[in-house]
């Protein structure tokens, strides 16, 4: 086999299998950092052997076996790990055949433990995101750094510190108890949604979107839904991400410029993703989760997805859904979105009145969408000079170059 072909095969298998591999190893050694080291060692072994021996029939099981053997060797060399050696010896006694990995249910349980460990509250949000993308998304530090426009060294430090923090805090590699799960699940869902949002509307940089991040987030959400099929909010998040992701191709013009929702060519919306999203939303509702924050946001996205043309959008229902969302997950941004929906349903004057009530909100002081929304409502009221000032103010606040140009163009057209 040509070396480059083998390398591509290793990289592809790594992207698919790394999370399960790390999760399975972490269950054995009870140390996420050590588990990743062992998985990386197995990766290096694959890069050395596959070009000579060919890609094995079951690459994932091959990597797991290689990593477990590494674990045994390592633990043998370290007296302090004697107790773990006995445990690993028992675990690997039946794993000499490449296909003899853990049972599917056990692997899924391991993945679930890894999800909750990577998003443990002892870590900062930035560390949770970096560790989740590294451990569960299989991204390299370079890929994470490019996605979030930070130096690679910064991401590497975050990951190293995160693993040390987990070890120092003695965070158990386990799914939290039932009474702790809701709070911890909220953190897990929040991290996945944050990853998606950064891909959907990049905070800074030259690109309006980073679709690869959206794809990673959708994939993580689907994995989570497979692991926790009875949790309505997990399905709510899947529904929200699937429906939002359906607009990816329509959100960017030929030269990479942003295309806002009313101007999007809805024929370019991905109908398969919409169907998947609506099915996930129905699943969330059937489990009694219609009133959850993610299910409500998915229901709002579904209103847009069901409208063939912008004029068919049920803004009254969307306004009602935002009102419900403001009760279960209140925030100034939800209030701003509610004001937009009210403006669309009942007229720009009513919407502007609500937006103006948010002008002194500290959390929105540097938020560029507040003046942007205000500018849009002022345009609809024919107050173009005031709208121009608002669009210019919004352009001065955003750190995304594509969005800045769009806002300046809107200011110039007033």
Image: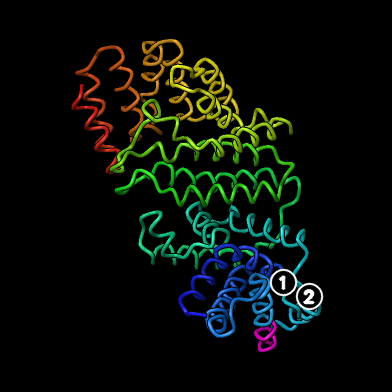
Q: Which mark is residue 148?
A: none
Residue interval drawn in magenta: 72-79
| Position of residue 413 measured from the top left corner of the image (x, y, whole percent) | 20, 24
Mark count: 2
The one nearer the camera, 104 or 386, is 104
Quick one: which residue is furthest to the bottom in this view? Answer: 77
- Outermost residue on the front side: it is 1
Q: Quadrant of residue 94?
A: bottom right
Residue pointed to by mark 1: 28
Disc assigned to residue 91: 2
Q: Residue at x 53, y 55 (%)?
A: 128
Q: Name the side, left or right, on which 295 lies relative to 387.
A: right
Frontmost residue, 357 versus 403: 403
Dot 1: what SS? helix
Query: Residue 363's x, y, as percent?
Result: 41, 34
Are circles 1 and 2 on residues that touch, CB within 8 Å? Answer: yes
Taking depth in this image into account, of 90 and 238 the one nearest to the observer is 238
Distance Cα–Cα, label 1 vs label 2:
8 Å
Using the rendered view, name the quadrant where residue 367 is placed.
top left
Task: Residue at 53% x, 71% y: name it.
Answer: 9
Residue 217 x %, y %: 53, 49
């Amino acid at each position: 086999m040509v070396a480059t072909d083998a390398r591509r095969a290793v990289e592809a298998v790594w992207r698919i299998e790394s999370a399960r591999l790390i999760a399975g190893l972490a269950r054995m050694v009870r140390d996420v950092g050590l588990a990743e080291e062992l998985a990386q060692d197995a990766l290096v072994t694959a890069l050395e052997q596959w070009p000579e021996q060919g890609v094995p029939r079951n690459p994932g099981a091959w990597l797991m076996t290689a990593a477990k053997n590494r674990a045994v060797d390592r633990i043998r060399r370290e007296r302090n790990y004697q107790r773990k050696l006995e445990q690993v010896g028992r675990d690997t006694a039946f794993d000499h055949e490449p296909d003899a990995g853990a049972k599917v249910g056990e692997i899924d349980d391991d993945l679930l433990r890894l999800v909750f460990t990577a998003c443990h509250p002892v870590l900062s949000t930035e560390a949770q995101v970096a560790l989740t993308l590294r451990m569960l998304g299989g991204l390299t530090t370079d890929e994470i750094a490019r996605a979030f426009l930070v130096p690679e060294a910064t991401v590497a430090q975050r990951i190293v510190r995160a693993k040390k923090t987990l070890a120092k805090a003695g965070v158990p590699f386990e799914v939290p108890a039932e009474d702790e799960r809701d709070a911890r699940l909220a953190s897990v869902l929040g991290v996945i949604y944050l990853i998606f949002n950064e891909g959907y509307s990049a905070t800074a940089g030259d690109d309006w979107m980073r679709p690869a991040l959206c794809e990673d987030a959708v994939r993580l959400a689907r994995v989570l839904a497979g692991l926790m099929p009875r949790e309505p909010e997990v399905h709510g998040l899947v529904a929200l991400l699937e429906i939002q992701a359906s607009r990816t191709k329509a959100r960017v013009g030929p030269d990479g410029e942003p295309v806002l929702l009313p101007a999007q060519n809805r024929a370019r919306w991905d109908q398969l993703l919409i169907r998947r999203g609506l099915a996930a939303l129905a699943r969330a509702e059937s489990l009694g989760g219609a009133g959850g924050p993610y299910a409500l946001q998915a229901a709002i996205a579904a209103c847009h997805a069901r409208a063939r043309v912008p004029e068919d959008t049920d803004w009254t229902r969307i306004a009602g859904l935002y009102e419900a969302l403001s009760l279960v997950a209140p925030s100034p941004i939800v209030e701003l979105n509610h004001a937009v929906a009210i403006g669309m349903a009942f007229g720009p004057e009513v919407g502007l009145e609500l937006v103006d009530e948010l002008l002194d909100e500290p959390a929105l002081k540097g938020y560029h969408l507040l003046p942007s929304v205000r500018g849009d409502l002022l345009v609809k009221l024919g107050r173009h000079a005031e709208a121009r000032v608002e669009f210019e103010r919004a352009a001065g606040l955003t750190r995304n170059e594509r969005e800045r140009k769009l806002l300046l163009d809107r200011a110039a057209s007033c």
